[in-house]
Amino acid sequence: MTQLPQGALPWLHDTCRFIGRFVFRPALRLRVRGLAGVPRTGPVVLVANHSSMLEPQIIFGMLPRRSVFLVKEELFTGLPGRGLRGIGQIPVRRGEVDRTPLTTALAVLRDGGLVGIFPEGTRGAGDVTAAEQGAAWLVRGSGAVVLPVATRGTHRPAGTRRRFRPVVDVLVGEPFELAVGKGRTGLAEATEQIRVRLAGLVHELDVVRKQSHD
């Protein structure tokens, strides 16, 4: 089992994961907590907040197992796009109803893989005030556990100076099982549970960061 979409290159995926563990170390002061809690086997839907394009790359590199992320389709052009497909990432059209990415991700989960989603849908300051329903749909179809991951430190507010080696924190929460009911109501309720758990983890990380600066 490759736990990757059809057509992906496992050797390329593993090579890029290895590179991803070290590529940001010269530019960032990375602090990762809770990594031991990542399930090493079985289907997992990872949900994370994000405020820049760095978070997916950081999480991809730090995880102790192969991971497949839903990535906005605009990045799948030219050589970078071929590279993303080669390592098994899945293009998704934002704001459009398209089941193809989700069915591809569902096949990965049923193969025992890990699929990552940034459920707030659009990239802002990394706060989780809304969530799309893809994660809940995947959990309902695969029986996967949900793994929340909070990140902070990549966002530089407009009008501020560039920072030298900013501190970037990643906090991996406890994986949890999620019962997703039938129909749209079931999806909406499960999505809200995911949003609340992820928002709570982001708040926890904010408290930790504040205490470390006091």
Image: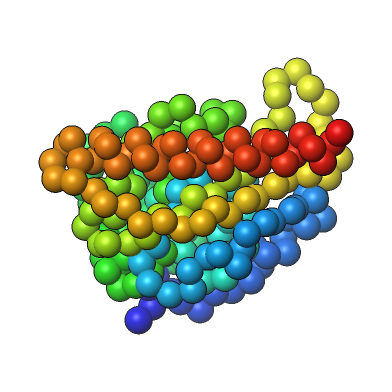
**How many numbered marks appear?**
0
In the image, residue 159 above or below residue 81: above
Q: Write the residue at 46% across / 58% down.
A: 175
Q: Which of 123 and 84 is in front in this view?
A: 123
Please identify the quadrant where the C terminus is shown.
Answer: top right
Left/right of residue 22 with respect to residue 38 in the rendered view: right
Say if residue 47 shows up in the picture: yes
Query: Residue 204: which quarter of the image?
Result: top right
Whether residue 52 is visible to the viewer of this picture, yes or no, is: no
x 49%, y 50%: residue: 148
x, y percent for residue 192: 35, 35
* Residue 195 point in image, percent of width and height: 42, 37
Residues 155 and 6: in front is 155
Quadrant where the N terminus is found in the figure: bottom left
The scheme the figure's colours follow is: rainbow
**Front in this rendered view, residue 23 or 32:** 32
The extreme bottom residue here reads 1
Spot the residue most to the left: 183
Percent x, y for residue 123?
51, 32
Give the image quarter of residue 23. bottom right
Image: 93 above or below 89: above
Task: Say whether residue 128 is left or right of residue 27.
Answer: left
Residue 92: x and y in percent read 34, 45
